[in-house]
Image (cartoon, rainbow, N blue to C red):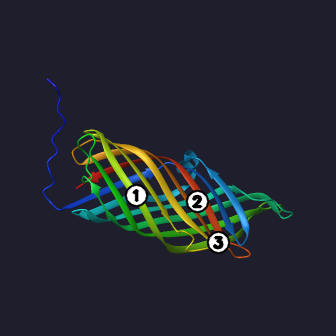
Amino acid sequence: MTDLPPVVAAPNSNWAATAEFYALIPWADSNTTVKGFDAVTTLNPSEIFGEQLQSAFAMRASVEYKRVGLLADVSYSQLGAQQSFNTSSELLSGNSTVSSINGIYDFALRYRFGSREAAVGVPGEFSLIPYAGVRVVEAQLVVEAQLQNPRQFVKQGKLSRTWAEPLIGLQGSVFLAPRLRAFGRFDLAGFGLAGEQDLTGNAQLGFGYAVGNNTSLNISMRYFGQTWNNGARLDNGYTSHQYGPEVAVKFFF
C-alpha cells in the first residue's frame, strides 16, 4: 500500500506567527580602525566559543494577518580580548587585542506570496516574502596595542556607536518532501547613508526538517558582512566578515 503524504489542514485563522532561535558558528575576519590605528583579527569557531564568547542571544520572529506582517531579527554578542595584529612601529610590537560588543536589530514590514509558512507541507508548495524596514547596529570596540618595552598593552582607542539604516530583503522556502523544505534569505542595509562607508548584508541557504507538526530543525550556510567608516582624517570604522553553518529550531503558530 502506497504511503500518502500527511494531510495539512487549512488554517482556520487569519493570524499566523513564527519564532526561531538560532546560533551562527562562524569563522570571522575583521579589521577595526580607531583614530587611524588598524587592528586585524581572524577567529575560528573553536576560538570564539572556547575562549572569546562572553554572552550571546539570537532570535527571529514574525507575525502576519492574512498576507501582511511584521518581522524582527535580534542578534547580540560580546567577545573578550581577541588577539589581533597591527603594523608595528618603533614603539609597538605588532601585537594588539580587540574587545567587542556587536548587536544587529532588524524590524521590517513584510508581504507573503504563496502558501503560509509551516513545518509540514505538500511538495512544491512555496512561500516568497519580500520585506523592508530598518536595521539598528550597535558597535562597541576597544583596541589595545602592545608596547615594545615594557611588554604591556596600552589602550589605543574605543569605537562606540549605535545607528539606524534602511533595510531591504527577500526570504523564501519550498517543500521538497512533506517534512523537508529548502529555504533561503538575502538582505542589504545601509547604502552609505550612515557614514562615508556603511553597508551590511546577509546571504543564507539551507534545509529544514519537521520534527513535529509545528516545529522544524534548520541547518544552513550563512554569510554576514559589515563595513562602516566615518571617513575622517584619523578615521574610525570596522569591517567584518562572518561565514559558516547556522543551526536553529523554528516554531510555527
Mark 1 or 3, closer to the camera? 1
x then y, percent, for residue 103:
49, 65
Q: Could you tell me how far apart the alpha carbons at marks 1 and 3 are, in whole angstroms?
A: 35 Å
Q: Residues within 10 Å of mark 1 (few under 14, many from 20)?
A: some
Residue 193 percent coordinates (x, y): 55, 74
**Mark 2 Cα within 10 Å, few/some/many (few <14, many 20+)?**
some
Task: Name which residue type carries label 3.
Answer: Lys
Which residue was labeled with disc 2? Answer: 80
> What element does badge 1 sit on?
strand
In the image, taking residue 21 as reference, residue 231 lies left or right, namely right
Question: Is 5 rendered above or below residue 62?
Answer: above
Q: Quadrant of residue 17?
A: bottom left
What residue occupies the far right of the structure in this picture?
90
* Residue type pointed to by label 1: Leu
Local SS, label 3: strand
Q: Which mark is first along the chain, 3 or 1?
A: 3
Mark 2 belongs to which amino acid?
A: Gly
Residue at screen point 50% across, 69% down:
137
Residue placed under numbered mark 1 in the picture? 170
Marks 1 and 2, the one that precedes in the sequence: 2
Which quarter of the rendering shows the C terminus?
Answer: bottom left
Percent position (x, y) of residue 85? 72, 56
Residue, disc 3: 158
Q: Quadrant of residue 158?
A: bottom right
Residue farthest along the bottom direction in this orientation: 232
Q: Is residue 91 left or right of residue 70?
A: right
